[in-house]
Image (cartoon, rainbow, N blue to C red):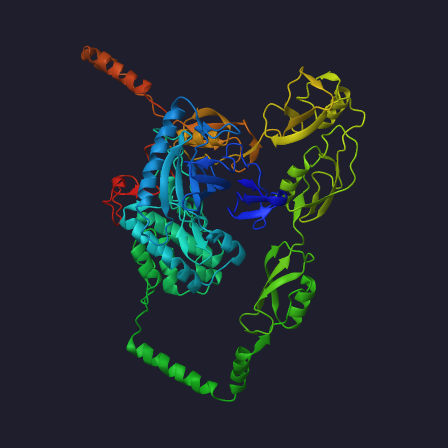
């Protein structure tokens, strides 16, 4: 939003922070945002879009596979808000420069509509939570552009995850004091028969005033492609309990208890708990006390009880979790397997006669210790009381600091290496601080060491506009300066040369010199030329064609392409064969080649779920079936590319899928068949029908390693009578 005022000054509203300012340019003085910056993704709404005739949309705050969240300005109530747009990428798209969402046809359309319905229903539930302290207020829900939008309270501050990046580890008492309001909020949420299902440091927000808010209620965690087949669950490893891997079986307040306990564990140890599925096979979760964390045994037991992988052994409610965490009484450790308190080792009974003998021996030993050997006791006492003064190692080279500490009988321990403007190897901070005293039993000095200036990859500025350069340098923290202009077939004021070669590693914040195009003096603007075909050529080859045709070329954008090789032209703004005059400016799109997609882990998952996960990553697949005695029918046994590896978009992943255990062929009973008349024929028909109706899908039987408890196993848990329908999921 801009309005001209005297002296070419403009009144501008920043699309990032929504502050209003007067300036000659488009750079916000409050946050440094350049107004006019294009969205990060082409399917995002452009900043300046107005929704529902009153919400001015700004920059994207965050986005994922199911939606996009924007900062916005309520033009009626004159306040900042956040707007979440329902946008499942598997089911819909948006053309660049448009506002309406295009919904795919067929099953995808049905899936989009079902998801949209759920999105609106959840919004209605969330609006009822406005009285609960610690939850984000939801103001409105409306439909537009073939989708729906959720208008929420805008929060200014940072997430707990962002804070932990800086703070690393929090003292237990501080962490518990901070998280207690979250516990209280979740208690109220559970009273409304709602579950959050995604409590993580990313979803706990700390406002500038210090208030904690629980975020991300409105995110859909069902894949839009999963309807009526299998359910694709988005879980955060380390924070999600096993039941969240089990197609939403047996979820309740206990689910949020586990996730919150994992969050507290991260706060006080600096570590994310090992994934719950892995823990079910072999539990290697380290207790905080074993990691050297200062915590009471009762607090540790409370935390570990809440992190039990078995639901029946886990703390069931937030009320119970809070009571255990802050209890002044001893909290017993609940065994994960049995669900019973861990028994303390019992003291062995000693007969009185033996006990008396031991007492006599002890008295004798004590009397002997009082004799001439008292000097040893004095020395030992003095040693225990000996203190060491910590020196100042900040700003000192690591090797020198280690030598100095060694001379003082102290030990330097590196806890982290961080980028800084200090020379690599220089100590940035220490704990304990200089001048503090340490005892004989704790002579470690924990330090953070400089890793030197952070390196960034030098961008390729050649062929792009100076305005685009400003956007890139802001994103990459690179300073650019311009030198003399040079004659070139590149569009005037576009970059011709750069002082650092593209792709080189340079220090973050380094200065790069750019040369801009001055155009060509010999260009004859009145002459007519035929537009050459530039698609498929490199930019250098296009420059030669441009000189022949008396035109100027520049680069508008880069984009992924499976049709054109990397660094070749995938599109041109004026099609080949058209008549153009000399000096015509042509904008080109440069291919970055296929997008690199991360291969998901689909082993031990149902085939339908595996298909969804691969499709989400734009990957193809083939399927080979084989018999397997260990895993049920329809379970993926192997994948040809290791999970986590990056491959080109459209790559094919070969899957090996279980056919279940091989059945022994039934013996034919000819005599019996003949004697039974027509019944044999009837049975044969029924059997054939049964075989033909068999489909490969997610198994109903337990999957090994995934924590399924067979029905009728006799396992019990608290609240086992609660059915899935008794709980509503807050997404």
| Between 32 and 320, the one nearer to me in the picture | 32
Q: Would residue 705 be visible to someone looking at this image?
A: no
Task: Please state which of residues 80 and 600 is positioned toward the viewer in this rendering.
Answer: 80
Count of labels in the image: 0
Task: Identify the image quadrant of the C terminus.
Answer: top left
Q: Position of residue 310 (x, y in %)?
A: 34, 48
641 or 244: nearer the viewer: 244
> Is 666 left or right of 91, judged from the image as shown?
left
Residue at figure coordinates x 38%, y 64% from the top left? 297
Return the residue found at the far right: 522
Q: Residue furthest bottom?
A: 371
The spot of residue 628 in percent (x, y) is 40, 30
From what the image shows, is residue 144 above or below residue 300?
A: above
Please, which residue is most extreme toward the front here?
A: 6
Residue positioned 68% across, 65% down in the render:
396
Image position, residue 33 (x, y; %): 58, 45
Is residue 477 visible to us here?
yes
| Lateral position of residue 610 relative to residue 385, left or right | left
Q: Is residue 706 left or right of residue 49?
A: left
Residue 166 rendering spot, x and y as whole percentages: 54, 56
Write down the quadrant of residue 539 in the picture.
top right
In the picture as drawn, the residue positioned furthest to the left comes out as: 676
Q: Name the residue nearer the viewer: 657 or 21.
A: 21
Q: Is residue 675 left or right of residue 469?
A: left
């Amino acid at each position: 939003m801009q309005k001209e005022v005297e002296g070419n000054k403009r009144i501008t509203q920043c699309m990032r922070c929504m502050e209003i300012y007067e300036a000659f340019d488009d750079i916000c003085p409050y946050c440094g945002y350049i107004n006019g910056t294009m969205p990060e993704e082409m399917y995002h709404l452009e900043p300046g879009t107005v929704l529902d005739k009153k919400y001015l949309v700004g920059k994207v705050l965050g986005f994922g596979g199911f939606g996009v969240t924007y900062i916005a300005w309520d033009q009626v109530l004159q306040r900042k808000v956040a707007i979440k747009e329902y946008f499942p990428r598997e089911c819909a798209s948006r053309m660049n420069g448009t506002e309406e969402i295009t919904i795919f046809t067929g099953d995808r359309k049905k899936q989009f509509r079902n998801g949209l319905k759920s999105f609106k229903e959840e919004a209605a539930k969330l609006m009822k939570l406005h009285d609960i302290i610690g939850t984000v207020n939801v103001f409105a829900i409306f439909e537009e552009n073939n989708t729906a939008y959720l208008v929420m309270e805008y929060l200014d501050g940072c997430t707990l995850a962002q804070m932990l990046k800086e703070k690393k580890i929090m003292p237990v008492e501080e962490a518990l004091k901070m998280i207690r309001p979250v516990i209280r909020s979740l208690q109220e949420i559970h009273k409304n028969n709602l579950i959050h299902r995604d409590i993580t440091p990313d979803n706990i927000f700390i406002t500038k005033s210090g208030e904690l808010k629980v975020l991300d209620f409105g995110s859909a965690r069902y894949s839009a492609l999963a309807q009526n087949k299998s359910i694709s669950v988005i879980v955060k490893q380390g924070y999600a309990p096993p039941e969240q891997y089990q197609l939403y079986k047996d979820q309740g307040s206990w689910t949020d208890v586990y996730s919150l306990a994992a969050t507290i564990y991260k706060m006080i140890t600096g570590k994310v708990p090992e994934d719950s599925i892995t823990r079910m096979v072999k539990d290697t979760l380290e207790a905080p006390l074993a990691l050297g964390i200062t915590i009471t045994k009762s607090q540790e037991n409370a935390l570990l009880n809440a992190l039990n992988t078995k639901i029946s052994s886990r703390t069931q409610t937030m009320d119970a979790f809070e009571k255990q965490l802050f209890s002044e009484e001893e909290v017993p450790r609940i065994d994960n397997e049995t669900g019973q308190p861990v028994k303390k080792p019992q003291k062995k009974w000693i007969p009185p006669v033996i006990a008396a003998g031991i007492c006599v021996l002890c008295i004798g030993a004590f009397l002997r210790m009082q004799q001439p050997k008292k000097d040893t006791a004095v020395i030992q006492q003095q040693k225990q009381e000996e203190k060491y003064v910590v020196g100042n190692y900040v700003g000192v080279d690591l090797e020198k600091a280690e030598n100095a500490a060694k001379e003082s009988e102290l030990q330097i321990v590196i806890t982290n290496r961080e980028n800084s403007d200090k020379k690599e190897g220089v100590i940035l901070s220490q704990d304990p601080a200089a001048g503090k005293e340490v005892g004989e039993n704790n002579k470690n000095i924990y330090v953070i060491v400089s890793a030197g200036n952070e390196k960034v990859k030098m961008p390729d500025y050649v062929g792009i506009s100076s305005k685009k350069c400003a956007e890139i340098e802001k994103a990459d923290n690179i300073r650019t300066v311009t030198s003399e202009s040079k004659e070139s077939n590149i569009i005037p004021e576009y970059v011709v040369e750069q002082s650092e070669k593209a792709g080189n590693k340079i220090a973050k914040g380094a200065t790069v010199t750019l040369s801009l195009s001055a155009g060509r003096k010999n260009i004859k603007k009145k002459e007519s030329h035929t537009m050459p075909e530039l698609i498929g050529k490199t930019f250098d080859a296009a420059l030669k064609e441009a000189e022949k045709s008396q035109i100027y070329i520049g680069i508008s954008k880069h984009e992924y392409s499976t049709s054109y090789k990397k660094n070749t032209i995938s599109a041109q703004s004026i099609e080949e064969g058209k008549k153009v005059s000399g000096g015509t400016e042509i904008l080109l799109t440069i291919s970055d080649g296929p997008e690199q997609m991360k291969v998901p882990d689909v082993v031990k998952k149902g085939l339908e779920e595996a298909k969804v996960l691969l499709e989400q990553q734009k990957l193809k697949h083939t399927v080979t079936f084989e018999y397997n005695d260990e895993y049920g029918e329809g379970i993926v046994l192997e994948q040809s590319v290791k999970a986590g590896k990056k491959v080109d978009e459209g790559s094919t992943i070969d899957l090996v899928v279980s056919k279940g255990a091989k059945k022994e062929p039934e013996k034919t009973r000819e005599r019996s068949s003949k004697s039974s008349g027509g019944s044999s024929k009837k049975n044969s028909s029924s059997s054939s029908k049964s075989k033909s109706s068999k489909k490969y899908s997610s198994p109903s039987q337990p999957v090994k390693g995934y924590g399924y408890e067979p029905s009728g196993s006799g396992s019990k848990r608290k609240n086992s009578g609660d059915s899935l329908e008794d709980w509503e999921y807050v997404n």
